[in-house]
Amino acid sequence: MIEIAYVLVYCNSPWTTSVDIIRYCLLQFIKYSYRFIFHHLHSILIRKLGDRSLYALARGCPNLTKLNISRLSAFSDKGLEFLSSCCRKLKILNLLGCYKAITNNSMKAIGDNCRQLESINLGRCYEVGDAGVKNLAYGCPHLNVIDLSECFIITDESVIALANNCLHLRSLNLYYCVRITDRGAMYALARSRVKNKDEILWESVKSQYEEEGLMNLNISQCKDLTPPAVHAICDSFPALHTCLGTLNMHGCLKLTSVHCACDSLLYHAIHPA
């Protein structure tokens, strides 16, 4: 079996200026080569593709598990919906900056079709709303990494849905999600640790569980958060450290008093009772 780790489709020749030429060449390449190579392709990184290219890719590469189409703006949500319906084995999907294609409809398609998804980057996808994130959370329970940075219109509802349904969440990026508050989002995340603990055979898998839970949380520029809510997160997930950067609170002026457990241990070591 021929397996390719990554294919970069990008033309940098000075005489190639037409996107149509690139697209035509790619379509012909997929049309005549996928039976021999792409049928076994597991991961692919692409640049400068539109809907027609995504259709061809989806038909020719149904076994994709990793796909990076970040910073592309030529394809639409219809192309992404079709791709998700064909590539149901996707586990890692990078859609950073695909602001034209990421809508609630395409998010629903991903949630309905890509149920093995473990990691998704939706950073700078400005049309992502609560409905889309909730569809993703309901349909992809194995998600452990999600980047929602600069998804300005999501609210606490998105975080609550992720906390309640994606119980293996390890990394959550909420950078500049300015509508996130501590009225529901942070406490829901803190409680997710307890929910996860209740829904598994605790004693039999205790060692495995100790390695689960949030390992990275970025709440930079989420200016409505308050110290009690973030302290609840820190208490639930001891792997989050302000000193190591695994808990990023840059720009949150209300949180200057929040520190990880390391600072408390250091204080008590210096000032014993």
Image (tube, rainbow, N blue to C red):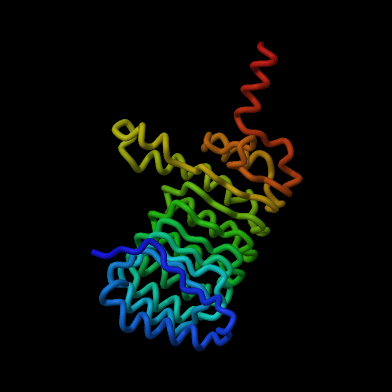
- Dividing the image into 4 quarters, which one contains the C terminus? top right
Q: Is residue 172 left or right of residue 88?
A: right
Q: Position of residue 61 (x, y in %)?
A: 33, 73
> In which quadrant of the rendered view does residue 58 lie?
bottom left
- Dividing the image into 4 quarters, which one contains the N terminus? bottom left
Q: Is residue 232 above or below residue 183?
A: above
Q: Is residue 242 left or right of residue 159?
A: right
Say which residue appears at 35% left-offset and 74% top-offset: 85
Q: Position of residue 36 (x, y in %)?
A: 26, 74
Say which residue appears at 64% left-offset and 35% top-offset: 243
Say which residue appears at 36% left-offset and 32% top-offset: 207
Task: From the viewer's side, name the closer residue of 11 and 195.
Answer: 11
Task: From the viewer's side, name the closer residue of 270 and 226.
Answer: 270
Q: Position of residue 206 (x, y in %)?
A: 35, 32
Q: Is residue 156 above or below residue 271?
A: below
Q: Position of residue 193 (x, y in %)?
A: 46, 41
> In which quadrant of the rendered view does residue 123 lie?
bottom right
Task: From the viewer's side, name the closer residue of 146 and 192.
Answer: 146
Say which residue appears at 49% left-offset and 57% top-offset: 161
Task: From the viewer's side, name the closer residue of 246 and 61.
Answer: 61
> In which quadrant of the rendered view does residue 111 lie?
bottom left
Q: Is residue 264 left or right of residue 121?
A: right
Q: Residue furthest top?
A: 273
Q: How many marks?
A: 0
Q: Is residue 86 above or below residue 175?
A: below
Q: Residue furthest right?
A: 253
